[in-house]
Amino acid sequence: MPAGELRHTSPPPPLPDTEEEEGSLWPQIKAEARRDAEAEPSLASFLYATILSHSSLQRSLSFHLGNKLCSSTLLSTLLYDLFLNAFSTDADLRAATVADLRAARHRDPACVSFSHCLLNYKGFLACQAHRVAHKLWTQSRKPLALALQSRISDVFAVDIHPAAKIGKGILFDHATGVVVGETAVIGNNVSILHHVTLGGTGNTVGDRHPKIGDGVLIGAGATILGNVKIGDGAKIGAGSLVLINVPPRTTAVGNPARLVGGKEQPTRHEEVPGESMDHTSFISEWSDYII
C-alpha cells in the first residue's frame, strides 16, 4: 500500500449479547474479589485461585465446579476440562450463567455481591453443573451425565435429573432438598426455594413431571406431582401439594392446593412473582388460610 494511504477497514462486528453481558460482569466480579481479599486476607489465596487468576467467568466457574465436585476417582482436572469445553463452545450456557447470577443478585437480599453468588451459592452452582450434565445427556453421554448428577446431589443436596430442561434467570434460593424429575421443564425467570419437589405420581413412564412456566415462584417445601402445567407468572405457596394445573397469574396454596379466590374466578396478580419474590401477599385474600 502506498505511503500515506489510509487503510479502510470495516468496524468490527458487535459482540453477541452473551459476550457483552459476560464481558461487563466479569470485571465487576474480579473487583469484588479484590475488595474481599483486601478486607479479609485469610481469603486472599482462595479468591486468587478461584477468581483473580482466571481470564474469564467461564474459566473461573469451571475451575470452581471442578474442585467442588471432584472425588478420589473423578478428578478435578477432568471435570475442569469437561466444564470449560461445555461453556466455551455453547453461548446459551454462558448466557444462562450470567442470567442466573443476575437473578440471585437482584432477587435475594442476602446476596451481597456477584462474587458471593459465584463462590458460595450452592443453588447457583448446582444449576450450572446441571446445565452441563443436561448437555451431556443430549449428546448421548448418559453415563457421564448421571455420574455428574450423583456428585451434584452428594455435594449440593440438589437432585436434578440430567434430562430435565431448565431455562435462564433461575434462582434456587437455599436449594437444599430440591428434587427435579426427568421430564420436568422449568421456564425462564423462575424462583424456587428449598425442599421443593417436581416429581411424578408413581411408577408411570413417559412424560410424567411438572411443566413450570416463565416467572413462576415456588415456595419452600412445595410439592408438585405429575405432568401438570404451572402457568406463566403463577405462585405456589410454601408447603403446598399441587396435583392439577394452575392457571397463569394465579396463586395456589394448601394441601391439597386450592386457588386463591376460588376455582371459578381465581384472584389474578399483575406482578411476576418469580422476580418479585412476594411470598405472602395472598394471605389476606384467603381467609381460610388464616388461623
Image: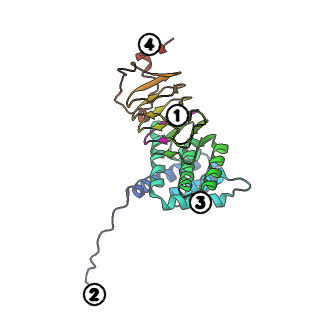
Name the mark nearer the viewer: 4 or 1.
1
Q: Residue at x 47, y 34 (%)?
A: 228
**Distance from label 3 to label 2 (Cα)?**
50 Å
Q: How is the image coloured?
A: rainbow
Give amino acid for label 4.
Ser
- Callout 4–callout 3 Cβ contact below 8 Å: no
The residue tagged 3 is 82
For numbered disc 2, what is the local secondary structure? loop
Disc 4 versus disc 1: distance between alpha carbons? 28 Å
- Verify whether residue 192 appears in magenta: yes
Q: Residues within 10 Å of mark 4 (few under 14, many from 20)?
A: few
Looking at the image, how many numbered discs can be counted on the residues? 4
**Residue 59 percent across, percent down from the top left:** 55, 59
Task: Determine the residue positioned at 37% across, 61% down.
Answer: 15
| Mark 1 residue type | Gly
Q: Are marks 3 and 1 in contact (CB under 8 Å)?
A: no
Task: Judge the density around disc 3: few (<14), some (14-19), many (≥20) Cα neighbours within 10 Å.
Answer: some
Give me the C-alpha separation between circle 4 and circle 2: 85 Å
Query: Where residue 3 is drawn, which disc sits there?
Result: 2
Amino acid type for the residue under numbered disc 3: Leu
Q: State the residue position of label 1.
A: 226
Residue 287 image label: 4
Q: Is residue 1 above or below residue 209?
A: below
